[in-house]
Amino acid sequence: MRKLVSALLTVVLLLIAAACAGRSPGDPVGAVDEDPYSESALRYGMAPMPHPDLTYQPDVVLVGGGGRSVRSVTADGLTWRIDGRAPRADDLAPGKVMFVTGRGVGRVLDLQREGGDLLVTIGPVTITDVIRDGTLAKQGIAIEDPVAYQAGEPIWALDEEEADARLATPSGRAGRSAPLRLAPPPPRPAQPAPTRGGGEVKSVVANFSTGVSLNSGAEVSFNYDRDGTSCPGGPR
């Protein structure tokens, strides 16, 4: 289910980034590749850009370069390795909101420097945590060339020890039960490359299975099956 939610959240954030896009002289975040199907944009998302009709919250840091400033992201989408030399990357700090792409936006929970890169672990934010004032146009969504992203295994499907290891931040602070790790946590897998084009994406986690079909439209299915108890959910 979390994979499905992550996919839907990705669509929302991409729409926010597109609605906020614009270019103005002297833009502090620098020039970016605005092709939504470039390699960096597909893998990490589109860059946010200042717009005269939109005001961000004062603690939002627009990191320059968009997807080209991103080195990698963990499969759970929480820890982003970004170029420490990217415009405004030095303004990042715990408590700030990082906005590097439409997929890389969240409250900074942990920040570590590794060589010339920054490892930024983020948590969830609402739209009003990012946007202070503005006008957003309501538009229809045409699914002509969909892109599917696979999220990491949801935390509720893991035992407590493995969950703590998965949630541990690069500095060693874990996210659920262990307040501090003296030894470095095991490395978390990187997020796989997205899949472009139509078709069906399925995932099975514990006793749950979800599916998303992206062709001329979008259909979602959800099923639960355990010890003879099943709860099928057809296309939606």
Image (cartoon, rainbow, N blue to C red):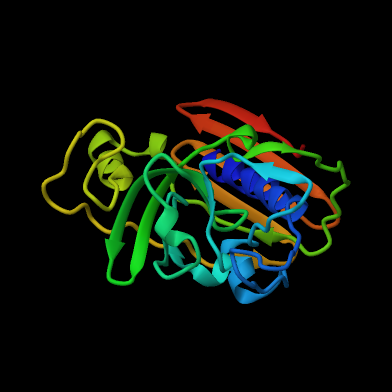
Please tell me in which quadrant of the rendered image residue 5 appears: top right
Query: Looking at the image, which residue sits at the far top?
Result: 229
109 left or right of 173 in image = right
Q: Position of residue 210 (x, y in %)?
A: 60, 43
How many numbered marks appear?
Answer: 0
Query: Does the image show residue 80?
Result: no
Q: Name the spot of residue 15 as percent of width and height, x first.
A: 73, 50
Q: Nearer the viewer, residue 130 or 145?
A: 130
Residue visible at 57% across and 45% down in the picture: 6
Quadrant of the snapshot with the N terminus: top right
Q: Is residue 34 above or below residue 22?
A: below
Left or right: 31 in relation to 154: right
Horizontal side of residue 220 vs 152, given as left or right: right
Residue 41 in sight here: yes
Q: Quadrant of the C terminus?
A: top right
| Residue farthest front in this picture | 26
Q: At which x and y percent is residue 181?
A: 16, 43
Q: Is residue 77 above or below residue 84?
A: above
Q: Position of 52 compared to 27: left or right?
A: right
Question: In the depicted view, which residue is nearer to us: 80 or 20?
Answer: 20
Residue 56: x, y in percent? 63, 43
> In the rendered image, which quarter is residue 180 located in?
top left
- The residue at the far left in this view is 182
The residue depicted at 35 percent of the width and 58 percent of the height is 119
Residue at position x 57%, y 27% in the image: 230
